[in-house]
Image: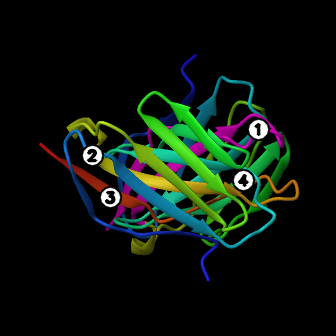
């Protein structure tokens, strides 16, 4: 089983709708999770960090963490064409491990 | 702050040649990482460093070498380039063991023919 799993998509969402991206993880020791956005041909860009159970909102983005069910999600409200990108979920490996485990990414397309 | 910088942006190597990919950060981060990303695939960790003079292997270290003589610089050396090393290489850094957020450089696109 992969440590961090994402649906590779592609996921198509109409402009103005909510895009929902999901990620599951296997390491119960993982405490912190991150969402990166990667435009085609560019490097990953950190957009959200979440460290505790519940929701964390930043503008149009909301990250959700459920440690009991071992999933992380990213909601993008009022989706814009500029949100079209691949979204990578990453989790720290726990117990002071300095590395992140990355999922393979979900490709999101916002349809005008 | 320039953040994480990488040079070159693009490079074409012939099989058997060697080269060094440069990475530097000006954020005073202790941890630095090298990843490769093949088309449509996720990030694979090649090597990482938790401080000057300390390096360790990641998932795919074969064919690569690193050194970390200063906090700022973390070069990646490719010896005897092979077509399987055609990829995009990203360098990243994070502050310390209590701050896991990694910040990425713009990448180097390498083709080995």
Q: What element carries label 2?
A: loop
> Could you tell me which quadrant the N terminus of chain B lies in?
top right
Q: Is residue B2 magenta?
A: no
Residues tagged 1 and 2 counted as in contact (Cβ below 8 A): no
Q: Label 3: few (<14), some or many (≥20) within 10 Å? A: many
Secondary structure of residue under mark 1: loop
Return the chain for callout 1: B
**Mark 1 and mark 2: Cα distance apart in space:** 28 Å
Q: Are marks 1 and 2 on the same chain?
A: no
User: A98 left or right of B40?
Assistant: right
Q: Which residue lies furthest to the bottom in this view?
A: A1
In-front residue for pair B20/A80: A80
Q: Which mark is residue B48?
A: 4
Given contact means CB atoms under 8 Å apart, are the residues at marks 4 and 2 in contact? no
Whether residue A35 is visible, yes or no, is yes
Q: Are marks 4 and 2 on the same chain?
A: no
Residue B46 vs A56, above or below: the answer is below
- Sooner in the amino-acid sequence: mark 3 or mark 2: 2
Range of residues picked out in magenta: B86-113
Q: What separation in Å lies between label 3 and label 2 (alpha carbons)?
A: 8 Å
x and y, in percent, of residue A82 in the image = 25, 36
Viewer-nearest of discs 4 and 2: 2
Q: Do labels 3 and 4 share a chain?
A: no
The reply to whether the C-beta atoms of the residues labelled 3 and 1 are less than 8 Å apart is no
Rendered residue at 81%/38% (across/down): B96
């Amino acid at each position: 089983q992969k440590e961090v799993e994402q649906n590779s998509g592609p996921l198509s969402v109409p402009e103005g709708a909510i895009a929902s991206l999901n990620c599951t993880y296997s390491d119960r020791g993982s405490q912190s999770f991150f969402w990166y956005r990667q435009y085609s041909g560019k490097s990953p860009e950190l957009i959200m960090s979440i460290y505790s159970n519940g929701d964390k909102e930043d503008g149009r983005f909301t990250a959700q963490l459920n440690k009991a069910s071992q999933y992380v999600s990213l909601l993008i409200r009022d989706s814009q064409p500029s949100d079209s990108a691949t979204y990578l979920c990453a989790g720290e490996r726990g117990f002071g491990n300095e590395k992140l485990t990355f999922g393979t990414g979900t490709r999101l397309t916002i349809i005008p | 702050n320039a953040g994480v910088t990488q040079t070159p942006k693009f490079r074409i190597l012939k099989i058997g040649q060697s080269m060094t990919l440069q990475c530097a950060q000006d954020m005073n981060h202790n941890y630095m990482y090298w990843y490769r990303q093949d088309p449509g695939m996720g990030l694979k960790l090649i090597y990482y460093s938790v401080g000057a003079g300390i390096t360790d292997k990641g998932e795919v270290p074969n064919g690569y070498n690193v050194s970390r003589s200063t906090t700022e610089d973390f070069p990646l050396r490719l010896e005897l380039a092979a077509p399987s090393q055609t990829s995009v290489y990203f360098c990243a850094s994070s502050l310390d063991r209590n701050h896991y957020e990694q910040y990425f450089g713009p990448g180097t696109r390498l083709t080995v023919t």
